[in-house]
């Protein structure tokens, strides 16, 4: 009986100490997709499934991203090898204090999903380290 109380007290202490850690759902930048970003309406048609064509990649963070030169990279899933493989990469320049940014077609990049499939999309810093990532399905 005494050992049961000791185990119960230790378990209670362990549970309480674990509750002190606060985990926030958006502790890291979040990436998502929309058809386009409009100055008046904002994000138009947010989804994770689109038909082939041009899309806009959105990144939202609770803190400044601290990026200047960055990249959006697509890796496409290869069903034959069951692996994601490099597909293409786009260069962008943003302001380091930005917390909310969209990446879309511009004079340097077409940001086009030309082929159906599953893609892993990354926002990379200038050292090619992942800042944010997400999955997207492109259908015909």
Image: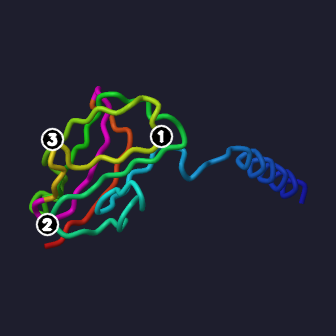
Q: Is residue 52 above or below residue 28?
A: below
Direction from residue 129 to residue 119 in the image, left or right = left
Residue 40 colored magenta? no
Q: Nearer the viewer, residue 127 or 69?
A: 69
Direction from residue 30 to residue 127 in the image, left or right = left
Q: Which label's residue is closer to the chain start, 3 or 2?
A: 3
Q: Secondary structure at mark 1?
A: loop
Disc 3/disc 2 C-alpha distance (Å): 24 Å
Determine the image quadrant of residue 118: bottom left
Q: Residue drawn at (67%, 46%), measured in percent from left and top? A: 22
Q: Which is more foreground, mark 1 or mark 2?
A: 1
> Which contiguous range is marked in magenta?
114-127
Seen as rendered, the residue at the extreme right is: 2
Q: Residue drawn at (40%, 47%), measured in percent from left and top? A: 59
Disc 3/disc 1 C-alpha distance (Å): 23 Å
Q: Which label's residue is closer to the chain start, 1 or 2?
A: 1
Q: Residues within 10 Å of mark 3 (few under 14, many from 20)?
A: few
| Residue contact between numbered discs 3 and 2, judged by CB atoms under 8 Å | no
| Residue contact between numbered discs 1 and 2, judged by CB atoms under 8 Å | no
Q: Residue drawn at (25%, 43%), measured in percent from left and top? A: 72
Seen as rendered, the residue at the extreme front is: 40
| Tag of residue 116 | 2
Q: Which label's residue is closer to the chain start, 3 or 1?
A: 1
> Dot 3 corresponds to which residue?
107
> Dot 1 corresponds to which residue?
99
């Amino acid at each position: 009986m005494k050992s049961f109380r000791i185990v119960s007290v230790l378990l209670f202490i362990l549970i309480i100490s674990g509750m002190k850690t606060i985990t926030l759902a958006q502790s890291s930048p979040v990436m998502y997709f929309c058809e386009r970003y409009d100055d008046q309406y904002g994000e138009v048609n947010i989804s994770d499934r689109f038909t082939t064509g041009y899309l806009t990649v959105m990144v939202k963070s609770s803190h400044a991203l601290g990026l200047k030169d960055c990249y959006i990279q697509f890796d496409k899933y290869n069903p034959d090898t069951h692996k994601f493989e490099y597909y293409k990469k786009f260069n962008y320049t943003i302001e380091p204090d930005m917390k909310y940014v969209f990446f879309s077609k511009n004079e340097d990049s077409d940001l086009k999903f030309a082929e159906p499939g599953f893609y892993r999309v990354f926002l990379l810093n200038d050292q090619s380290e992942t800042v944010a990532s997400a999955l997207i399905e492109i259908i015909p």
